Amino acid sequence: MKLLIATRNRHKFGEFIDLLGLPPEAVACAADRSDLPEVEEDGQTFAANAIHKAITWATVTRTWVLADDSGLAVRALNDAPGVFSARFAGPNATDADNNRRLLELMNGVTDRRACFKCALALVAPSGDLRVIEGTCPGILLDQPRGIQGFGYDPLFVPDGFEQTFAEIEGASKNRISHRARALQALRSTWPECLRGF
Ligand code: IMP
């Protein structure tokens, strides 16, 4: 393993595998590592959470670590759920619970604008750290559509599309998503990162 993807979310991990184009044997998912300490995602910003996770796990693994913290910011809800996206409906909420809560709060709201946000923190074995953000604007539907992806994907139609993230092909999501845009920005500001895999 040369790169640890600092997520236990298999869907996110799968998206990173497709986005990075690295050999599978070079990349590990945090869900497969029992030696990693729990990291509380209690920061006020996506970037704070991503940095905390990346540095904590880089200290343990001494490899490249790529951490992502992401979520949905809804204009009419003052950018909620934001950093609480994963636990919007409570500490053990499922994606379906979170989507239901969001739809309840958005019932009758005409301003449906929302934006997915992603902060990436990449730590090199040398200790170098870069943090960068990517966004993907769109609108929220009033009922879920599609079965692909995860999280709020069935409710979110990205700008320029008519289908939700849960309906479009993974390859299309990976061209325009907040995660894809953050990774593109990271690579353009740090071209030599993740080299030699
Ligand atoms: P994290 O694992 O703490 O970063 O939680 C991110 C949460 O934000 C997820 O549980 C989802 O609810 C939501 N989220 C982040 N990225 C996406 C995405 O690409 N699609 C749908 N939901 C997402």
Image (cartoon, helix red, strand yellow):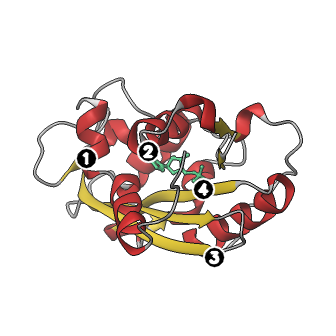
Residue with the mark numbered 3: 44
* Residue 140, visible in the rendered structure: no
Q: Earlier in the sequence, mark 4 or mark 1?
A: 4
Badge 3 vs badge 4, beta-carbon distance below 8 Å: no
Query: Residue at left 25%, top 51%?
Result: 176
Label 3 SS: loop
Vertical side of 156 occupied by 39: above or below: below
Badge 4 vs badge 1, beta-carbon distance below 8 Å: no
Query: Residue at left 72%, top 72%?
Result: 127
Could you tell whether 75 is left or right of 192 in the image?
left
Frontmost of labels 2 and 1 is 2
Q: Could you say where residue 189 lies in the image, as x and y percent from the top left?
A: 39, 74
Q: Amino acid at mark 2?
A: Leu
Q: Nearer the viewer, residue 118 or 183?
A: 183
* Whole-number angstrom distance, CA of label 2 to CA of label 1: 12 Å
Q: Nearer the viewer, residue 73 or 135?
A: 135
- In this view, the residue farthest toward the front is 196
Numbered label attached to residue 175? 1
Q: Which quadrant of the figure has residue 169?
A: top left
Numbered label attached to residue 20? 2
Query: Residue at left 51%, top 58%?
Result: 70
Vertical side of 181 occupied by 102: above or below: above
Q: Could you say where residue 33 lies in the image, as x and y percent from the top left?
A: 80, 36
Q: Amino acid at mark 4?
A: Leu
Q: Is mark 1 within 8 Å of ligand 1?
A: no
Q: Nearer the viewer, residue 130 or 139?
A: 130
* Whole-number angstrom distance, CA of label 3 to CA of label 4: 20 Å
* Whole-number angstrom distance, CA of label 2 to CA of label 4: 11 Å
Q: Amino acid at mark 3?
A: Gln
Residue with the mark numbered 4: 66
Q: Could you say where residue 32 lies in the image, as x and y percent from the top left?
A: 75, 31
Q: Which quadrant of the figure has residue 48?
A: bottom right
